[in-house]
Image: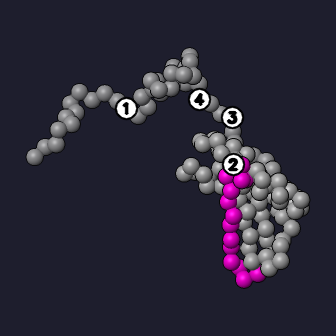
Amino acid sequence: MGYIHCCGALHKTRSYCLVPQENFRLCELDVLKKCPVCGHFVVQLTRVSIDDKISTVRKINAKAKKFFQSLQKFILYEEVPPKTPRFGQGTFYLYYNEFGVKKRCYSNLSTLKIGLYENKNLNNLPSF
């Protein structure tokens, strides 16, 4: 899974491995179907030459669709990231608040004042 920088953020894309052209070791195509911010269709071709020089070609919207259709015949396979199982994540939830009273509503978390205590003799003014 690749990433394309669009609208000030990195967005996950579908990555395809292409047949390397002459004088290139690696060709990879990243396709962003729709940017969540601007809605553009973005295609980026990244190539690595034999001299380890990287070149990129980036197209947007109508030009990107034509560019992607012209490169579809060179696609070898789609790069799929491996699925990793999620271990070590518990389902523990504390049903009591800081006073030892059972919580009645999950949406009242903003009213909790954990770590706060009342001190009547506290002066916030600095002493000189």
* Label 3 close to label 4 by CB (< 8 Å): no
Label 3 vs 2, first from the N-terminus: 2
- Pointers 1 and 2 in contact (CB under 8 A)? no
Q: Where does residue 77 sit, x and y in percent of width and height?
A: 88, 58
Q: Amino acid at mark 1?
A: Leu
Q: For mark 1, give the secondary structure.
A: loop
Asked whether the residues under the numbered discs 4 and 2 touch, taking CB atoms below 8 Å apart as contact, a structural biologist would say no
Q: Amino acid at mark 2?
A: Asn
Can the viewer see residue 79?
A: no
> How many residues crowd around disc 4 within 10 Å: few (fewer than 14), some, or many (20 or more)?
few
Q: Is residue 56 magenta?
A: yes
Residue 94: which numbered mark, if any? 4
Q: Nearer the viewer, residue 102 or 87?
A: 87
Where, by quadrant of the figure, is residue 124 drawn?
top left
Secondary-structure class at tag 4: loop
Q: Which residue is mark 3?
A: 91
Q: Quadrant of residue 45?
A: bottom right
> Can you tell which of label 1 and label 2 is closer to the viewer?
2
Residue on which disc 2 sits: 61
**Residue visible at 27% across and 29% down?**
119
Which structural element holds mark 2?
Answer: loop
In the image, which is nearer the foreground, mark 3 or mark 2?
A: 2
Kindly identify the amino acid type of the residue bearing the numbered disc 3.
Thr
Q: Secondary structure at mark 3?
A: loop
Q: CA distance from mark 3 to mark 2?
A: 44 Å
